[in-house]
Image: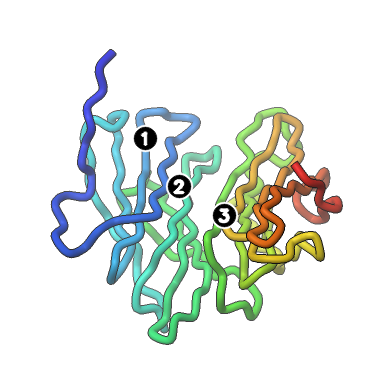
Amino acid sequence: MTFNNVRISGINPGDPREESDIRYNYNNLQQIICASTKLGGNQPMHHSSDGGATWATAFLGSRPGDVRQGDPTIDWTSDGTAWTVTIGISATLQLILRTFSSPDAGVTWNFDSTVTGTQTAMDKEALWIDHSPSSPFRDNMYLIWHNGGPCFISARAGGAGAWSAPLQISGGETTGTAIGSDIKTNADGEVFAFWPDTGSQNLYVSKSVDGGTTFQPPITI
């Protein structure tokens, strides 16, 4: 089988793209959404309904106080709703996590919510939705990021739920910045949060068995 590179963002002189994320619909592999950070304006959301052969582009809506958006992360709930969390960036470089959803596989996007709390340096977030049919927490949504040095997590019970208050899962073991974290679940719905530490140069993992309500002390990988 031969695959060809496809430029999905078009030709954008002076407007490079970076920090991309891409995810297909687990229940319809023909549906794919990809997004990237652009230098200015609202975040473009590229979407395909034919397995990546052709693409179209939509844009997220503006939020009060945000001058641009970036660091997209994407996933899908089992009802076919697509989700993205992006950073809303203000003129004074305050960084706030915004959630948007799409009922039509990326063609249109609706603002959903802002992650609660008072943090204003939320960065390098990663979103994961529990896709396992055998999980007691199927469709739970998990979001991980760093705010300054520490690593934080928020969880919600599916699309109808609300983001929990940010829970700091890193501690004294993380002597630098927990930038570049990730979060995943297994078939039993157990949650695994991973993050690096720029100080010790170690990788850490913390586990939750209650749908992201609590996490065990981190261990070194």
The front one of 214 and 150 is 150
Q: In the image, what residue occupies the spot 70% across and 50% down?
A: 202
Residue 175 can be seen in this image: yes
Residue 31: mark in rendering: 1
**Residue 70 percent location from the top left of the image:** 40, 64
Q: Secondary structure at mark 3?
A: loop
* On screen, residue 208 above or below 125: above
Q: Nearer the viewer, residue 108 or 178?
A: 178
The residue at the point 37 percent across, 57 percent down is: 109
Q: Earlier in the sequence, mark 1 or mark 3?
A: 1
Mark 2 secondary-structure assignment: strand
Question: Mark 2 or mark 3: which is in front?
Answer: 3
Q: Amino acid at mark 1?
A: Gln
Task: Give the residue at the far right of this rendering.
Answer: 217
Q: Is residue 72 shown left or right of residue 211? A: left
Q: Are marks 1 and 2 in contact (CB under 8 Å)?
A: yes
Residue under the point 62% across and 77% down? 119
Relative to residue 84, is residue 118 drawn left or right? right
- The CA distance from mark 1 to mark 2 is 10 Å
What residue sits right under mark 3 in the picture?
Answer: 180
Which residue is label 2 attached to?
Answer: 82
Give the amino acid type for the residue marked by disc 3 in the picture: Gly
Q: Position of residue 129 (x, y in %)?
A: 60, 44
